Structure formats: structure tokens, C-alpha cells
Image: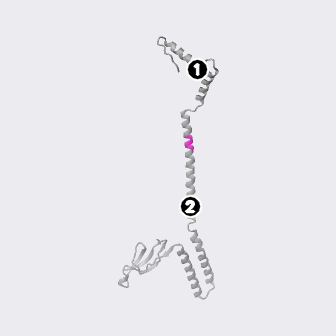
Amino acid sequence: MLKKKNKENPHKEATVETDVINEIIPENDETHGVLENEELKEDANAPSAIDIVKEELALANDKYLRLFAEFDNFRRRTVKEREDARKLEGKDLIVSLLSVLDDFERAAKAMENVTDVAPVKEGLVIVQNKLKNILTQKGLKAMESIGTPFDPELQEAITNVPAPNEEMKGKVIDEMEKGYFLNDKVIRFAKVIVGN
């Protein structure tokens, strides 16, 4: 704004200032009052800083709740999928063993009317070999214990007996229950008799 300083009369300075404003926007100009009203309306309609922060907080809270709900749904879904997977873990093995079960049922029916034991024995050996082959395909491997040195990480000693010769001392003489590996991990320890 243009101000003319008047040291003698300070009231005159204010009059000069008003005159300059009136020169730019005359008092009888209709836009002068309209501009002031619009500015006041804009200030009244403009959101305050608190309103802006409240709105941002509401948006952040909404986003958080949606994210939390999405994570909770994901967690529930994965828990359900894991439970379903556990229920069906051994499905492949069981399906492959069903044929062996069928063979045993046929053998049981056949033994009711059989007088000769040799064919029954031969049939049972065939079913046993079939079962061993299926389990071997699934990663099962039998431990060889007899004649090997006693290993407490693979074998469980049931008892000690006098060794028949010096070579068999500290070695497995007999096997009460066979031990097994599944994919090179022990799933059942062999129960053995050790020579001393």
C-alpha cells in the first residue's frame, strides 16, 4: 500500500491510507463488499487444522482396521489349510496300502476252505513282499543290526547275553524287533540282544 507520512498530523496519515484504498476499490463499488463476504465465507467453510487431522486419523484408523481384518482372515485361512493338510498327510500311503489290505482279506477267505497249507503260505509271502515294496517306495528302509557293533543311537538293548565267541562281544547277537529308517531318519529303534 502507498502511505504518505505526515509527521505533523498522525490522523491525516490514516485518511491518506483510506484514500489510497478508495482509489483502488471505490466505496460505492459493489465488488468491495462481495469480496469481503466471499473471503469470510471461504474462511468459514475451510476446514480447520483439527478437522483435517481428525479426517486423516479416521482414514488411518479405517486403513488399520481393514489391514488387521485382512491379516486375521489370512491367519485363519492358513490355520485351516494346515489342519486340512495334516488330516490328509498319509493319504498317498494309505491309498497304496489298500491293495495289500484287499489281498489279506482274500487270503483270510481262502484259508477258511483250504486243507493244504503250502498255497496259503506262498500267498502270504507274496502279500508280505508287496507290502515291503510299497513301503520301500515311500522311503522306508529296514536296519541291519545282527552282527553289527551295538549303537545306542540306532538300537535299544533289551538284554545282554554271554557272547558265543570273542568276535561277538559288544555286537548285536539277535534282534527282537527290527528297526526302520524313513528317508534316512530313524523312525523306530531296533530292539536287540547284545553279547558281552
Please state the horizontal and vertical placement of residue 16, each as a whole percent of the image: 53, 15
Cα separation, mark 2 vs mark 1, equals 81 Å
Q: Which residue shows up at 55% across the image and 43% down it?
A: 61
Residue 186 visible in the shown view = no
Q: Position of residue 179 (x, y in %)?
A: 47, 75
What residue do we see at 55% from left, 39% from top?
A: 56
Q: Which residues are magenta?
A: 57-62
**Pointer 2: what residue?**
83
Give the residue displayed 54% in from the left and 34% down from the top.
50
Q: Residue at x 58, y 20 (%)?
A: 24
Three-letter code, disc 2: Glu
Q: Nearer the viewer, residue 124 or 114?
A: 124
Q: From this viewpoint, is residue 62 visible?
A: yes
Q: Are marks 2 and 1 in contact (CB under 8 Å)?
A: no
Residue tagged 1: 24
Instruction: Tell me which corner region of the image, top left, top right, bottom left or bottom right, holds residue 19.
Output: top right
Say which label, 2 or 1, has the lower sequence index. 1
User: What is the quadrant of the C terminus in the image?
Assistant: bottom left
Please tell me whether residue 107 is drawn above or below residue 14 in the rendered image.
Answer: below
